[in-house]
Amino acid sequence: MSRQPTKSRCAALGLLALAAIAQLSWTIADGEDRPAAAPPAAAGEPKPSQYAPAADLIDQAEYYIGRIGEALTDEKEFNEDLQKRTANDANTLAVIALVLAKHDEANKLQAAPFLPATRRLAEVADKFGPATAALAEVKKAAEAGGAPAADVAWEPVAPLDSLMRQVPIVNNSLRRGLDPNRFKRQQKQAAGQAATLAAIAQAAQFDLSDADDASAADWRALCREMRDAAGGVNSAVHAGDPSGAQAGAKRLAQNCDACHEKFRGGK
């Protein structure tokens, strides 16, 4: 009997595509059984610079490294809420590191040690001592530079449930930044947030742990659509075009509607 991925896959896309729509509350797979190998990227795929410029992702990587560091300043204050936040931040950082490692724009975080260091941090992010030590290694790798790894593959580097908890936070802040009254002063932040959403969508397409043969192609197509819509927001933000950015946000909402129609009969 084939597995039925309908609800969890649509939940993931619904959260990825949050833009001008209400947050969803479906349960998604925890990703513990993610496959070791992922299918190759389709021919003709856009370069990362087209949806998530390296400079924007570096800004976001530095933001998450700083926020994780703030959470790890006092063990007595490292409560359950901070543990969850830090885990989500670390998983997001790992996704950003993956896209930077595969990026067509040479960048300072493309060096071989950085991605594995972020993945180790994500594994222990809810434990104060190990997370503190792992964060120090991430910072060291970020500063060391060096040659990029030659064998980095597009593959799952973070569980979908963690990424989905992060997406509404990023997206809600992005939507506020696209308001014409805030657009100019939050332009850099909005560009980074759009790039982060695009990076999450790009990475999510390779997590087929809950997909069967019939649904895998649809899942990948919807992830790519999400990535390209977020990339469109990023491009419009860089162009100083709030109307274009809002049009991109509308595409994200339409992507969510398409997911509903495909997997839940329009419900």
Image (spheres, helix red, strand yellow):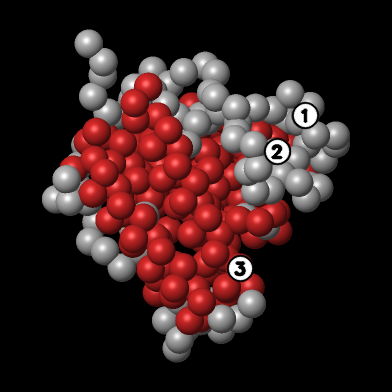
Can you tell which quarter of the image residue 231 is in? bottom right
Q: Provide the residue designation for mark 1.
A: 149
Q: Residues within 10 Å of mark 3 (few under 14, many from 20)?
A: many
Label 3 residue SS: helix
Amino acid marked by disc 1: Ala
Q: Is residue 176 above or below residue 202?
A: below
**Dot 3 or dot 1, earlier in sequence:** 1
Query: Disc number at residue 235?
Result: 3
Q: Residues within 10 Å of mark 1 (few under 14, many from 20)?
A: some
Residue 177 in picture, x, y percent from top left: 46, 75
Label 2 residue SS: helix
Give how far apart the Cα atoms at labels 3 and 1 are: 28 Å
Residue 77 in picture, x, y percent from top left: 37, 46
Give how far apart the Cα atoms at labels 2 and 1 are: 7 Å
Amino acid marked by disc 3: Ser
Q: Is residue 46 above or below residue 161?
A: below
Q: Is residue 129 left or right of residue 21?
A: right
Q: Residue at x 65, y 27 (%)?
A: 153
Amino acid marked by disc 2: Ala
- Circle 2/circle 1 CB separation < 8 Å: yes
Q: Residue at x 80, y 34 (%)?
A: 148
Label 1 residue SS: loop
Residue 133 in picture, x, y percent from top left: 59, 31
* Depth check, front residue: 45 or 135: 45
Q: Provide the residue designation for mark 2.
A: 101
